[in-house]
Amino acid sequence: MNNVFPDFKDIELKDIKLFKEFFYYYKPETSEWTFTNLFMWRNYYGFKWAIYKDWLFLICYKGKGETMAFQPVGPPSRKEATILLLEWLKYENNIKKPIITRADKRLVKEMEGVESLSINPEREHFDYVYLREDLVKLSGNKYSSKRNHINKLLKSFNVIYDDLDMSKIANCIKLQEKWCRQKRCDEDMSLMGEWEAIKEVLIHFDSLDLKGGVLIIENEVVAFTIGEMLNNKTAVVHIEKADSDLPGLYPFINQRFCEHGLQGAEYINREQDLGILGLREAKLSYYPNYFAEKFSLVLR
């Protein structure tokens, strides 16, 4: 293997087996740790990876002086690997404030007592985790508005839910292009980055071994969603897009996908809100069962 630390390399589709093996044994609880997530965002974040002993190292490489790291993935204890990675950022990359971002609670616990680290919660990166049963049944007063939106949609249109497969990919791309026109993606670098990431997932849908669902009205795909199992009990939803002109599509595809596409899960991780107020309100409106917390580790 030629990418032994500190020889980092770009993420490629052929790396999927190695990454999945690391994640199978680690059993992640936070949404970053699927091959799909890292692959789809690899260009936007400049992801590169290397192996150090029994650990997978991942960095966001934006050039000298702009690099940060994600947590080492592998067996405990990761103290040695974590300190090595932070010191490499500091001394080899001239990072004045070496940081590991989006670290989970397991790593924080492993690093207890290391006085050279400053550890702080990153609320904007907390994942929202729900009981699948809650999202399927939408029962009780707290979900009445979701049910009302769905019922209004179904009274107005004949909406068909179906599994996503390669025969529907072109129509999903068409819908995403419409969504981007509605949201003026070309004026927002983050939305353009998201569009490129979604395109990667759609094009490589079969190779990434994902699950997905679509809503169809009059032979047109009006919403699509994509996810996969994160660990033995939890599924993660990577993408959810719908025609902005039709209210009720988002709660309906969420409900149907959780019911028909993610039957093996007890929990559904719907990722973070990135500190965006509207996104935070939307995720809170589904009443998460708990947050998968994340932290920054900064070398003092």
Image (spheres, helix red, strand yellow):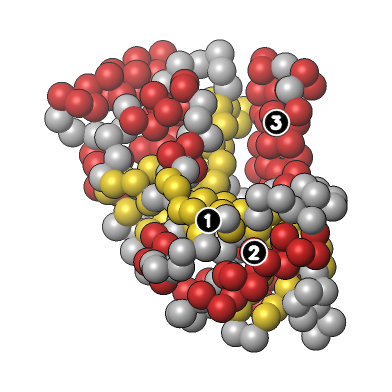
Which of the 4 quarters of the picture holds residue 257? Answer: top left
Q: Are marks 2 and 1 in contact (CB under 8 Å)?
A: yes
Mark 2 is surrounded, within 10 Å at the Cα level, by few (under 14), some (14 to 19) or many (20 or more) other residues, namely many
Q: Answer above or below: position of 245 versus 259.
A: above
Q: Is residue 24 above or below residue 124?
A: below
- Give the residue type that dot 1 points to: Leu
Which one is earlier in the sequence, the residue at label 3 or at label 1? 3
Furthest residue toward left: 140
Whole-percent x and y of residue 66? Answer: 77, 47
In the image shown, does 5 or 248 lie closer to the viewer?
5
Residue linked to disc 3 = 190
Measure how far apart labels 3 and 1 are at the Cα level.
Answer: 25 Å
Question: Identity of the amino acid at label 3?
Answer: Ser
Q: Residue at x 39, y 50 (%)?
A: 293
Q: Which residue is mark 1?
A: 297
Q: CA distance from mark 2 to mark 1?
A: 9 Å
Where's residue 189, x and y in %?
Answer: 76, 28
* Residue indicated by mark 2: 86
How many neighbours does mark 1 have within 10 angstroms: few (below 14), some (14-19), or many (20 or more)? many
